[in-house]
Amino acid sequence: MSNVVNCGLIQTKNDIATTGNGTDKKTIARIQESMLEKHLKYTKDAYDKGVKILCYQEIFNGPYFCAEQNSTWYDAAEAIPDGPTTTQLKEIAKKYSMVLVVPLYEKEQKGILYNTAAVIDADGTYLGKYRKSHIPQVAPGFWEKFYFRPGNLGYPVFKTQYATIGVYICYDRHFPEGARALGLAGAEIVFNPSATVAGLSEYLWKLEQPAHAAANGYFVGAINRVGTEAPWNIGEFYGSSYFCNPRGQIIAQASRDKEELISCDLNLDEIEEVRQTWQFYRDRRPETYDSLVAL
């Protein structure tokens, strides 16, 4: 029996200009409608290519508004799973028999907001969500603590019809602890939807996540948006979304500057092959690691 799962990643950009400094609610709604429509087209393309698990980019239905600090963007948040976007995408997942990983700005209740990814199974069942754990506040242009509480759901994995998957979001990728926790919990594929620009951390893009894959013996799907976003222009979102295998080798990669869907066959049998060679989980010494969480 084949244990190969075709997976896909979408990298794209927002085409609707924002004013910054208090973009109005109507513009936010237009952006969300436009980005959803664009992703639905790519999702249909993914279905036509045989994709079974598809991940969207970080806060997929908006710009990266964390480039400014303005409470107007709080209006972009919605409930998960009962909000309009998750509700609609449950039907899409069922229609295409496709698992969807859907990163959204989540509103748990008034004033309690998270950077979240919903996971929907191939029959349209909502399986749960991951909330971004590590929240940056880095000048210039990454004012995330203004918008998001740190995640409080730990590092869950989701047993979908095709594979057991985990989610890490953008800045999380700089922290190996959660990546290890996902592997120990049984993740076979970890998706990292991101919004990251050229500059300081770009060289880490092809370093950290393949290292997580190799250290934990699982597949990683890393997503980044493309282009620049006015009026902030904090830098170029350089795309370069990719899949890497449990050996840490990049096996499929998107372009740097084009909107596109990439897909790749992932042979889940490779996980056991790699772990039987590199016995990292067997040789762990958790009884010696207390100091890692004592500081």
Image: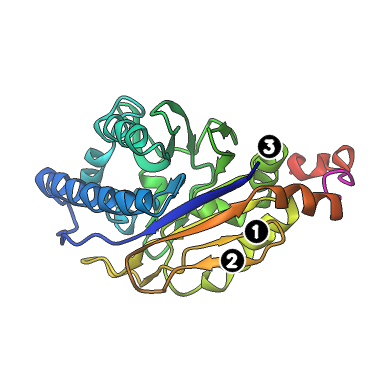
Quadrant in the picture for residue 92: top left
For marks 1 and 2 on the same chain, the one whose residue lies earlier in the sequence: 1
Read off the residue under disc 3.
186
Residue drawn 53% across the image and 33% down it:
160
For marks 1 and 3 on the same chain, the one whose residue lies earlier in the sequence: 3
Read off the residue under disc 2.
251
Q: Nearer the viewer, residue 45 or 230?
A: 45
Please give the range of residues in magenta: 278-284
Residue drawn 60% across the image and 57% down it:
174
Q: What secondary structure prevails in the magenta region?
A: loop
Q: Which amino acid does label 3 sit on?
A: Gly
Q: Which amino acid does label 2 sit on?
A: Ile
Q: Tell me how the rendering is colored.
A: rainbow
For marks 2 and 3 on the same chain, the one whose residue lies earlier in the sequence: 3
Residue 117 lies, in percent from the top left, at 43, 40
106 is higher (above) or lower (below) than 266: above
Classify the position of the C terminus by image quarter. top right
Q: What residue type is labelled 1?
A: Asn
Residue 42 lies, in percent from the top left, at 31, 54
Q: Is residue 42 left or right of residue 123?
A: left
